[in-house]
Image: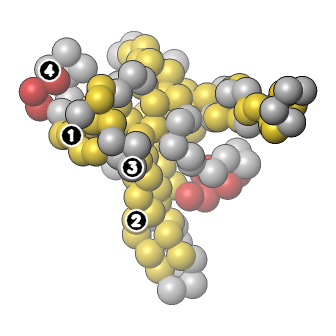
């Protein structure tokens, strides 16, 4: 069975989250995670985003920590394309740019806030990943 195609795909630059580096606190004897970024890469994605200055149009929801997260849009990526780049979308991955290599390239500084698997097929499972992105600094509700 063929994988679904994206409508009007653009190149999206992603910087995945990497928690590979950890230190140990000598006093508390526990590990301290250091947020790092893996090598950024480009992946084709279908974008839908609102005006980043128009916070009134952003959908809001509360995450489990009680923070108000404003969803500024989403990027739809094929699971197959993500697997070819050894990437599994995670909350905290950064989206740095859209339309890379074209005349309408736009720089973003957003973070993936929510992920929804889509387009399930019996033999393939979820063939699309809907990665919602929003502001990097959520507000307390």
Can residue 95 be seen in this snapshot? Answer: yes
**Residue depicted at 44% across the width and 52% down the height:** 115
**Residue depicted at 19% across the width and 15% down the height:** 53
**Residue 116 found in image quarter:** bottom left
- Disc 3 from disc 2: Cα separation: 22 Å
**Marks 2 and 4 in Cβ contact (< 8 Å):** no
Of residues 59 and 130, which is closer to you in this image? Answer: 59
Provide the residue designation for mark 3: 64
Relative to residue 59, is residue 106 drawn left or right? right
User: SS for tag 2?
Assistant: strand
User: Local crowd at mark 4 within 10 Å, few (<14), some, or many (≥20)?
Assistant: few
Provide the residue designation for mark 4: 54
Of residues 46 and 52, which is closer to you in this image? Answer: 52
Of residues 70 and 88, which is closer to you in this image? Answer: 70
Relative to residue 66, is residue 105 drawn left or right? right
- Disc 1 from disc 3: Cα separation: 13 Å
Relative to residue 35, is residue 45 drawn left or right? left
Q: Position of residue 7 (x, y in %)?
A: 34, 49
Of residues 43 and 103, which is closer to you in this image? Answer: 43
Q: Which mark is residue 60?
A: 1
Give whichever of discs 2 and 4 has the lower sequence position. Answer: 4
Provide the residue designation for mark 2: 118
Give whichever of discs 1 and 4 has the lower sequence position. Answer: 4
| Residue 8 drawn above or below residue 1 | above
Can residue 105 be seen in this snapshot? Answer: no
Viewer-nearest of discs 2 and 4 = 4
Give whichever of discs 1 and 2 has the lower sequence position. Answer: 1
Q: Position of residue 28 (x, y in %)?
A: 81, 32
**Marks 1 and 3 in Cβ contact (< 8 Å):** no
């Amino acid at each position: 069975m063929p994988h679904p195609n994206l409508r009007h795909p653009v190149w999206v630059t992603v910087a995945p989250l990497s928690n590979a580096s950890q230190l140990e606190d000598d006093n508390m004897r526990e590990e301290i995670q250091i947020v790092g970024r893996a090598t950024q890469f480009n992946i084709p994605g279908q974008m839908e985003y609102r005006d980043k200055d128009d916070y009134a149009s952003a959908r809001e929801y509360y995450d489990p920590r009680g923070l108000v997260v404003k969803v500024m849009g989403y990027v739809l990526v094929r699971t197959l394309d993500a697997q070819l780049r050894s990437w599994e979308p995670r909350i905290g991955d950064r989206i740095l740019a859209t339309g890379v290599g074209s005349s309408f390239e736009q720089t973003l500084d957003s973070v993936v806030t929510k992920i929804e698997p889509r387009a399930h097929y019996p033999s393939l499972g979820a063939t699309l990943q809907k990665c919602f992105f929003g502001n990097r600094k959520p507000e307390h509700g």
